[in-house]
Image (tube, rainbow, N blue to C red):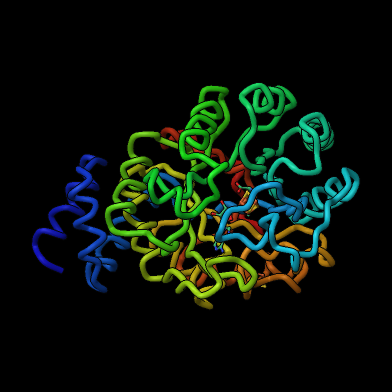
Amino acid sequence: MNDQTKALIDRLEATHTLSLDEYAYLVEHQTEQAAAYAAQRAFAVRTQIYGTDVYIRGLIEISSVCANDCYYCGLRRSNRRCQRYQLTQEEILDCCREGYRLGFRTFVLQGGENAVYSVEDICQVVRSIKGAFPHCAVTLSLGEFPRGAYQAMREAGADRYLLRHETADPDHYRLLHPPEMSFEARMDALHHLHDLGFQTGCGFMVGSPHQTPRTLAKDLKFVEVFQPEMCGIGPFIPQKDTPFRDAPPGTAEQTCYLLSLLRLIKPNLLLPATTALGTIRPDGRERGLAAGANVVMPNLSPLPVRKKYALYDGKICTGDEAAQCIHCLSRRVASVGCRLVTARGDIIQTASDRKSEALPLL
Ligand code: SAM
Ligand code: SF4
Ligand code: FES
């Protein structure tokens, strides 16, 4: 690691801001030593705020039907090989019941965009979950909707919304999406979500086709300026039935380095060590936690549909019961000196927000 890299990492920790050129410099000068130093600083910063707690979210993949055609994703509408399914409201509630029994206090409903459920269907399922589990948080990750639809979902009780920005560079956005999708619409949607009071998550894939240090610098700057509550990043992994089938995957090393930089940009950010990170490298999620991540999102979807939610090839945990994953994750989390806790896991604004409800899971 050269002196300039260390100085920039130190300044980022102290001030939480750098210029675009400086972010690009950090991306370009990633070395094993620089990544280890950033991870050590990020882990310390995260520990000051969240201790060694790692929050769990139960991910329920409610539908593989999608009206969009993102070039990178196996659920894109043009993929005729994708096996389509949609869960009923009762099936979704069953997943929540099982999750609640296992200790989950946040449910994430994720699926293809704007295809099978009406806005009222979504509101209805949110109301049912909040009615049955009033102390749990409901997160939605169902893509772009008009502001009024987001408002209805918020009024129905949804607490959080995950909508990755995918890239903060408009030209890069056009290379990842068909012409009918626009960077401006994605940015508008994210601002609506924040304005409506959702705890909002953005995020991007690491190593997506046509990504450069410059576009990554813009992603980092975007997080610095937008100040989301959450940021989901994971390596891009090619899916065999998409236009990007032959593109190289992103790396665990770069993902972990960026997780560390994100932690230094916003110390209280909720940062998942994603399933994609665990897919690209067997110990990817542990490395992500050691680099500053503080959330894991095990799969609560019914086993028979797991393989059908095939965003990318080789996805882990598609044959494992949620209970198995929790045991497995609990060991993995402990191996890097952290502990899985039951808690809604809201963003902590000050040290005194640290909730006593954060009991060890196992
Ligand atoms: N349809 C909703 C949306 O796009 O926001 C939610 C589901 S979508 C499958 C969730 C995320 O999966 C996307 O934001 C994208 O970043 C990620 N994803 C899709 N294809 C991927 C791939 N090939 N490799 C890694 N991540 C991928
Ligand atoms: Fe649909 Fe989301 Fe996949 Fe795009 S990333 S094709 S919106 S499921
Ligand atoms: Fe699912 Fe290890 S986390 S089996």
Regarding residue 78, the answer to whether it shows in the image is: yes
Residue furthest toward the bottom? 282
Asked whether, in this view, residue 343 is left or right of residue 286, the answer is right
Q: Residue at x 67, y 43 (%)?
A: 142
> Which of 187/56 is in front?
187
> Which of 74/149 is in front?
74
Q: Position of residue 329 (x, y in %)?
A: 61, 67
* Quadrant of the picture in which ligand 1 is shown: bottom right
**Which quarter of the rendering shows the N terminus?**
bottom left
Total numbered circles: 0
Q: Residue at x 15, y 59 (%)?
A: 6
Q: Position of residue 304 (x, y in %)?
A: 84, 67
> Which of 304/145 is in front?
145
**Which quarter of the rendering shows the C terminus?**
bottom right
Regarding residue 294, the answer to whether it shows in the image is: no
Q: Position of residue 77 (x, y in %)?
A: 70, 54
Q: Residue at x 65, y 40 (%)?
A: 139
When asked about the image quadrant of residue 224, the answer is top left
Residue furthest toward the left? 3
Q: Position of residue 30 (x, y in %)?
A: 25, 66
Asked whether, in this view, residue 347 is left or right of residue 214, the answer is right
Q: Residue at x 55, y 34 (%)?
A: 199
